[in-house]
Image (spheres, grey):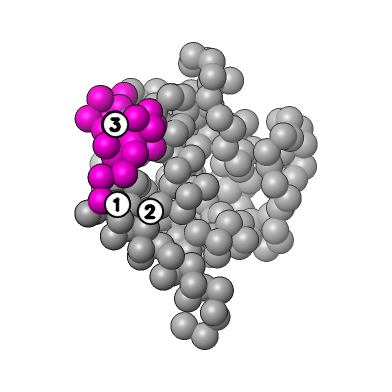
Amino acid sequence: MADPRRAAAALARAIREAGDLVIPVDCVVCRRAPGPVCARCARDLVPAPASIARLAGGAPIVVGAMHTGAVAAVLRAIKDEARPGLVRHLGPLLAAALATLARDVDAAASTLTPVTVPGTRRSDRARGFRVTDRCCRVIGVAPHRALALVRQPGDQRGLDRDERVANVAASMRARDVAGRRIVIVDDVVTTGATLAEAARAVTAAGGLVVGAAAVSATPRHGGPRGGHGGRG
Ligand SMILES: [Zn+2]
């Protein structure tokens, strides 16, 4: 570890993860009961997979739940507090989304290659892990890291759909996807702009995008109100 910032981030992460295992910390959802997620709040993390929209070519976007309540709180803690140990609470949501997608496109899951959406260099480095990759690994899915950013988009928060599309346009490049049946995997779907850019890059590199799967989607896609925005 030559980079001292990275070493410090890794150390802080190890301490947090150890703390999650041995110390009864506050539940990240209700902040009242012992955590990291209390039994009552864990019941709100039950998968409810839904096809919420389609990519430009018609491929479905399937999410494991709406991005509200406990789902939003856990994902926010994973990202803002850099707590990868909490990812196991969201794994079943992504697993349900992937299984539903495979069924919807009439494919065996084993024939599909999951390609994770890259985070920004700054956010990945600050946390020391990539959220989408962790979500895959916790359910035994090996992510194919075929997508990379060719430029760093600005923060998506606060941008409307058109601004998000412009912000991420031509920001990704894919490799090693030619001839493969690809599922784009992300954590939160907000406007779909990030998934659209990922699908464009995969298609440009010769991959066949059969769909996208994510842990959750913000309520603008038709669910109950009150969620928190993701990156796109
Ligand atoms: Zn709780």
| As drawn, 201 above or below 67 | below
Q: Quadrant of the C terminus?
A: top right
Three-letter amino acid code at the position of disc 1: Asp
Under 8 Å from ligand 1: the CB of mark 3? yes
Q: Residue furthest bottom?
A: 2
Q: Nearer the viewer, mark 2 or mark 1?
A: 1
Name the residue located 53 percent from the left edge and 34 percent from the top edge: 189
- x%, y% of residue 181? 41, 49
Three-letter amino acid code at the position of disc 3: Ala
Q: Secondary structure at mark 2?
A: helix
Q: Depth check: give the residue in front, 107 or 65.
A: 65
Q: To which residue does mark 1 refer?
A: 20
Magenta segment boundaries in residue numbering: 23-44
Closer to the N terminus: mark 3 or mark 2? 3
Q: Secondary structure at mark 1?
A: helix
Q: To which residue does mark 3 refer?
A: 33
On residue 84, the disc is 2
Crowd class of label 1 (few under 14; some 14 to 19; many from 20; radius 10 Å): some
Asked if the residue at tag 1 contacts the one at tag 2, i.e. Cβ–Cβ closer than 8 Å, the answer is: no
Q: Depth check: give the residue in front, 157 or 74.
A: 74
From mark 3 to mark 1, how far is it between C-alphas? 14 Å
Q: Is residue 27 magenta?
A: yes
From mark 3 to mark 2, how far is it between C-alphas? 20 Å
